[in-house]
Amino acid sequence: MLDAVVVGAGPNGLTAAVELARRGFSVAVFEARGTVGGGARTEELTLPGFRHDPCSAAHPLGINSPAFRDLPLERYGLQWLHPGLPMAHPFLDGSAAVLSRSVGETAASFGARDAGPYRRLVERFLPRWDTLARDFMSLPLTALPRDPVTLARFGLVGLPPSTWLMRRFRDEKAKTLFAGLVAHVMAPLGGFATGAIGLVFALAAHARGWPVARGGSQSISDALTGYLQDLGGAVHTDYEVKRLDDLPPARAYVFDTSPTALARIAGLGSHYANYRYGPSVFKIDYALDGPVPWTAEEPRSAGTVQIGADSTEIGAALHAAYGTDRAPERPFLITVQPSVADPTRAPAGKHVFWAYGHVPNGWSGDLTDAMERQLERFAPGFRDRVLARATAGPAELAARNANYVGGDISSGAVSGLQLLLRPKISLFPYSTPHPAVFICSSATPPGPGVHGMSGHNAAKAVWRRLRQT
């Protein structure tokens, strides 16, 4: 009998398996698709030689993840590559705000009136970032806070809505860039704890940047898999699990799946019936004949580029995705240009480019024209660079990854108490009514992103139980 079986070979499932194997437990992973990866995959979606990331592409939380930093993933091929700027946000007048490794450079891009307020906001937390990140990403009771005072101070700033935090800024550049940071997790700007979301992304950039993985996000999943196998763990692909009886006998079963799928497979009935799924995205992967022709200079060297004319436009786009059944007329776009930092991703002189806009959950329309009109506002002539495109709306995203219910790439709405307390309001979010069944997906704290911390935290709950039995 195995000690633990993990269902789903995304970053969280693989991290949970690694953490258990490191402690001497026998582990096997079962994955429905033909390759490991979940939200960290790389495929040739458009043309030969153009390597795209179907989901996550830039990794501020990955390089800052306490779980990943504790693992020897570099020995298994993971190499972080840094663009000249972690992120840029261009404006219609040809200027741009930036999120740089340097706090000073970032503050200066906001203008004189907001430089000081921004520096005071981030510089109080940056010296304690590593401890703060571990405490923040280990909540709830998976570990006692190492620095409860700093965590409490962070909570006072971050738990109110981001609109409160943005009141300290007087001009639009700082407000717009920060609104875009919050929108990375598709949270409404006025929602609970959204200030913390924006602040975490900013601090992550100043601490270690927003890199891409050399060769694509698949490198993260492959490194975790290689390490797991060296620890004696087994990985089985093309193995769909429909019920617990499909799995070999084990002392614990750990699910890197949606709560909906877990309830169906493990026979938990309506246990997660109140779990809410959030908006989806419409995503386009591009093969380009050259770099994106940004009007502003700063985005040309940035790995990630946010697209939204101002904070009001961003807020309206988020409201449309959350509060209506229509896609926004001017969607807020998150774009990533991996080949700015990683020339292996495309043939010489060519580029890969990744963009998505928010749409309602399950939306069935085509956002291509609206997205490209938005891009042309900030990069005139963009369409002339397109060699090929691969589009994916909510239905296609859900078909690629069963955890994305209705196309929700966050595996659950990131709003209200569900931002912090997911998948249920509980001090033990990784446990289920079945004593041998656990959940470790992005539907558990600390939530979405390629960071492995949900798997790391769940593994703690699992090994504590295994030691008791």
Image: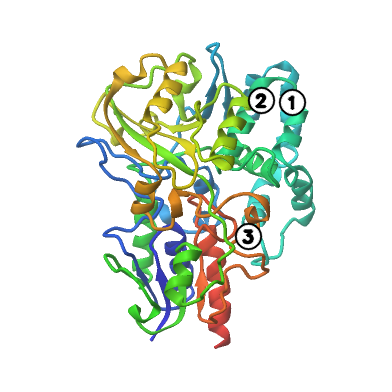
Asked if 290 appears above or below 219 in the picture, the reply is: above
**Spot occupied by residue 39 in the image (x, y as percentages of width and height):** 41, 51
Q: What residue sits 57% from the left and 56% below the top? A: 276
Residue type highlighted by circle 1 = Phe
Q: Earlier in the sequence, mark 1 or mark 2?
A: 1
Q: Which residue is mark 3?
A: 138
Of residues 283 and 66, the one nearer the viewer is 283
Rendered image quadrant of residue 340:
top left
Q: Which residue is mark 1?
A: 169
Q: Earlier in the sequence, mark 3 or mark 1?
A: 3
Q: Secondary structure at mark 1?
A: loop
Q: Are marks 3 and 1 in contact (CB under 8 Å)?
A: no
Q: What residue sits 63% from the left and 56% below the top? A: 418
Q: What residue sits 66% from the left and 46% below the top? A: 129
User: Which quadrant of the rendered structure holds the C terminus?
Assistant: bottom right
Disc 2 versus disc 3: distance between alpha carbons?
29 Å
User: Which quadrant of the rendered structure holds the N terminus?
Assistant: bottom left
Q: Which residue is mark 2?
A: 174
Disc 3 versus disc 1: distance between alpha carbons?
30 Å
